[in-house]
Each structure stands twice: as C-alpha cells, then as structure tokens.
Image: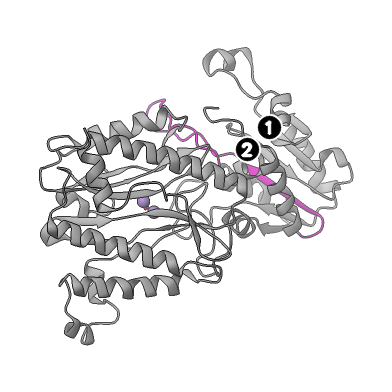
C-alpha cells in the first residue's frame, strides 16, 4: 500500500468492540466493495468497503470477513477469506496479499482462500447453531444508489438459500462504532489534514490572476500524491469568482480573475481516512474591504460554532443556533434587514438565501461519515464545521471549513495549523 502500515491493534480492537454488540449465537459477514465499471473494459480505482476496512485493514478486492464468535470450532470463529492469486494475476495486476501477510496485518489467525467460503459458511449456517445473521447494508441517510453492492447481492443470495434464519442489520452497530474515533484513527486523520495543509501552503504561493482553476487542482494533486495520499478525498471544488456561489462546482475550468475570491473545498485522503477543508482566498493576494468583511463574518461564525460543540450537543439543535449566529452577521453585513425578519416565512427564513446548507457532518473513513445525527455528540467524534455566505448578486461566496474532534470539554481542531486569518493568508500569498 502507498501509506505506512497501520498498527493492527486498531483492527483487533474494532472487532472486539463489534463482538460486544452482537446477540448470542451470531454470525457476521462483510464483503469487499466491487471494482466499479466505467465503459468498455474500464474500471474505477478500487475503494474498499469502509466497514470491512475498519474491521480488518485489508485494502484488497473480493475479501470477506466472517465472525462467528460462538462457533463450536474455535479455529473458525474469526475467518478472513482472500482472493487467491496466480501467476497470471501476478503478471497483470501485481502482488496480492499472502495468507501470512494478511495474518500479520489484521491479527486474524485463520486466513483462507475465497473458494473455501461457501462450504464453511454453509456449515456455520446449518450446524453452527446460528440464530442471528448480521449482514451489512449501506444505511447512510443520503444514499441514493441503484447499484447493488457485493453485500447487497450476498444478502439476496443468503435470504434465498436460508430463508428461515433470523437476519439482523449490521449497519446501525457499525455506525455507532465507527462514529467514535480511536487514537489510531485520529492520527491517520491528522495525517490527512497535514497533507492538506502542505498542499494549501503550496497553492498560496501559486495562485495569481490568470491561473486556471484546473492548474490549482493539479498543484493540490501533486502535493497530495508525493505525500503518500492516493489523492482527493472527494471531487475538489476550486471555484473562482461567481463559481464560489455554486456549492458543488467541480468543473474547475475557469481562469482566476484579478479582484475575485477563490473558494477551495479540497481534502486529502490518507490510508482511506479523509480531510475535508475549505478556504477562501483572494486571487490577487489582497481581499477587498467587502470581501474581508464577509470573510471575517464567516470566520466568526465558524469559531462561535466550534464553541457549541461538546459531548451532549445534538446536531440539529446546534445547527439552528449557528443559523441564528449567522443571521446576526448577515444583518451586520446589511444583507438582510432586522425588520423583515419579523415577517419572514418561518419555513423559509431570510438567512437561507445566503446560508443554505448544513453546518457540518461527521468525518472519517467516509467524507460524509456514518453516525446518527439525531443522537447526542460524543467524545471522539470528528465533525466538520463549515459555515458559508454566498452572495450571488456580488459573485462572492465564502466558506471556511475545519475538522474537529469532540473532547470532554470543547474540541481539538485537526486543522489548527492551516492558515485561516485573512491577514495570514494575504501575508503568505505575498511572500517572495
Ligand atoms: N466537501 C464536501 C463537504 O464539505 O461536505
Ligand atoms: Mn468540504
Ligand atoms: Mn464538509
């Protein structure tokens, strides 16, 4: 793998935490993601299923993890199935994990080739006294996919073959576990943030009027890749001028113009963990008075928002409070009028014209990470804090986004070292 080896204790610990949540006489099966097709014989780059990675650290296609903690034969209570390599696979695709390597990386003693899965799984299902079969679904609240994953196909197969077993949802358990990050995971996420910081500092020296948005994208990619990241955590948004008001602008095709701002929503991936940063900078190295007042309003809202994050905070209540803080700033900026607020439609408050998205989301193995947003925040969760003001009529959009860990009191900012003060950004852009 491109990234440094991860301490297997992370995965051993994660499996232990999962076992504690299971009913008696359970079996758990998790499948790798597919390598997704594009056109012709093309494929996308492989991206491991986040839950399988969380429990094993195996970053290889076609992998299966089976946990059957009460199985009679102790040897098979924890089994990893791997794609068996061949001379042909080695020639065309390169090295695949050996059983020894997988054992060392995951802490799982029993590693078998995939061909052995059907027989062993059948034995567990019919002779293992299994009462509860935990299978995995993608239960992210915004998922909208028409494609069946390997897990989804396995569920269909399983329910057809074993219709009278009792099936259980693994997803809510995985969401609860994954939403609390361990010290190993925080280190990996800090690494993703540090790589993002390095790239941001690089582009502060690079941006000037006339540079195209895609050239800036290339600078980010360069710095990410040379630091053992596999690239962007998500499609980067490199949006100058009026594009800064398009929330999901990913075309990144325009030249940056003198006097405009440039909104950068870009994060590095590292070892499957993600950073999610947004900074807004002046193309020519100096904010105009108006740009700076809007910028400082957003920065203030971000800082005030961070103060509200602590164990026990409920996202939707917090978001409402942030909207009120934002509303006060929008009044000061004369974008909305105090008297008009009294008559506004509560379903469509006036501030929504300028701040129409959420204040943040959980972050981890997925950029929009799993975890129930109705539940109280807990120590160890990582949240983005990302207020923005988008003034279409002025072609001026400003968003600032940091990633923070919830602690016993307050938060730990994983992006504390990434320049954010308007003056510091200007200063760095103007250094020779
Ligand atoms: N970059 C995606 C987001 O900020 O949620
Ligand atoms: Mn973002
Ligand atoms: Mn975000």
Place residue 312 in its image quadrant.
bottom right
- x 53%, y 19%: residue: 93
Residue 65's spot in the image, x, y percent? Answer: 69, 40
Q: Nearer the viewer, residue 9 or 37?
A: 9
Residue at mark 2: 57
- The quarter in which the C terminus is drawn is top left
- Judge whether residue 113 can be spotted in this image: no
Residue identified by numbered label 1: 105
Quadrant hosting residue 304: bottom left
Q: Is residue 162 left or right of residue 219?
A: right
Instruction: Verify CB contact (< 8 Å) between mark 2 and mark 1.
Output: yes
Marked residue nearer the N-terminal end (2 or 1): 2
| Magenta residues (range) | 23-49
**Label 1 packing within 10 angstroms: few (<14), some (14-19), many (20+):** some
Q: Residue at x 64, y 27 (%)?
A: 83
Q: Is residue 44 magenta?
A: yes
Secondary structure mostly seen in the magenta stretch: loop
Tell whether 145 sits left or right of 220. Answer: right
């Amino acid at each position: 793998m491109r990234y440094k080896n991860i301490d297997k204790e992370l995965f051993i610990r994660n499996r232990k935490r999962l076992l504690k949540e299971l009913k008696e006489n359970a079996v758990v099966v998790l499948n790798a993601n597919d390598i997704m097709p594009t056109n012709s014989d093309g494929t996308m780059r492989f991206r491991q299923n986040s839950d399988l990675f969380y429990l094993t650290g195996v970053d290889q296609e076609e992998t299966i993890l089976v946990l059957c903690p009460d199985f009679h034969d102790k040897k098979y209570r924890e089994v990893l199935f791997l794609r068996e390599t061949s001379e042909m696979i080695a020639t065309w695709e390169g090295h695949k994990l050996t059983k020894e390597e997988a054992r060392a990386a995951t802490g799982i003693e029993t590693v078998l080739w995939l061909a052995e899965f059907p027989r062993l799984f059948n034995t567990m299902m019919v002779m293992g006294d299994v009462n509860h079969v935990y299978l995995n679904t993608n239960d992210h609240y915004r998922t909208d996919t028409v494609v069946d994953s390997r897990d989804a196909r396995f569920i269909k197969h399983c329910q057809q073959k074993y219709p009278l077993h009792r099936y259980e949802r693994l997803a809510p358990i995985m969401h609860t576990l994954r939403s609390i990050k361990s010290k190993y995971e925080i280190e990996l996420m800090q690494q993703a943030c540090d790589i993002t910081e390095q790239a941001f500092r690089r582009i502060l020296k690079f941006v000037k009027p006339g540079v195209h948005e895609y050239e800036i994208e290339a600078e980010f990619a360069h710095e990410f890749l040379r630091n053992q990241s596999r690239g962007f955590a998500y499609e980067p948004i490199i949006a100058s001028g009026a594009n800064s008001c398009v929330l999901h602008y990913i075309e990144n095709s325009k030249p940056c113009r003198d006097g405009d701002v440039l909104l950068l929503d870009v994060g590095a991936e590292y070892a499957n963990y993600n950073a999610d940063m947004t900074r807004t900078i002046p193309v020519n190295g100096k904010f105009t008075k108006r740009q700076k007042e809007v910028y400082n309003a957003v920065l203030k809202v971000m800082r005030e928002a961070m103060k509200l994050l602590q164990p026990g905070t409920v996202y939707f209540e917090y978001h409402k409070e942030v909207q009120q803080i934002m509303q006060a700033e929008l009044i000061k900026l004369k974008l909305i009028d105090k008297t008009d607020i009294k008559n506004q439609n509560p379903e469509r408050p006036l501030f929504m014209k300028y701040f129409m998205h959420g204040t943040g989301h959980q972050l981890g193995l997925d950029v929009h990470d799993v975890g129930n947003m109705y539940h109280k925040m807990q120590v160890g969760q990582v949240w983005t804090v990302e207020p923005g003001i988008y003034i279409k009529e002025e072609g001026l959009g400003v968003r600032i986004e940091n990633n923070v860990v919830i602690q016993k009191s307050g938060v730990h900012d994983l992006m504390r070292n990434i320049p954010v003060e308007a003056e510091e950004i200007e200063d760095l852009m103007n250094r020779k």
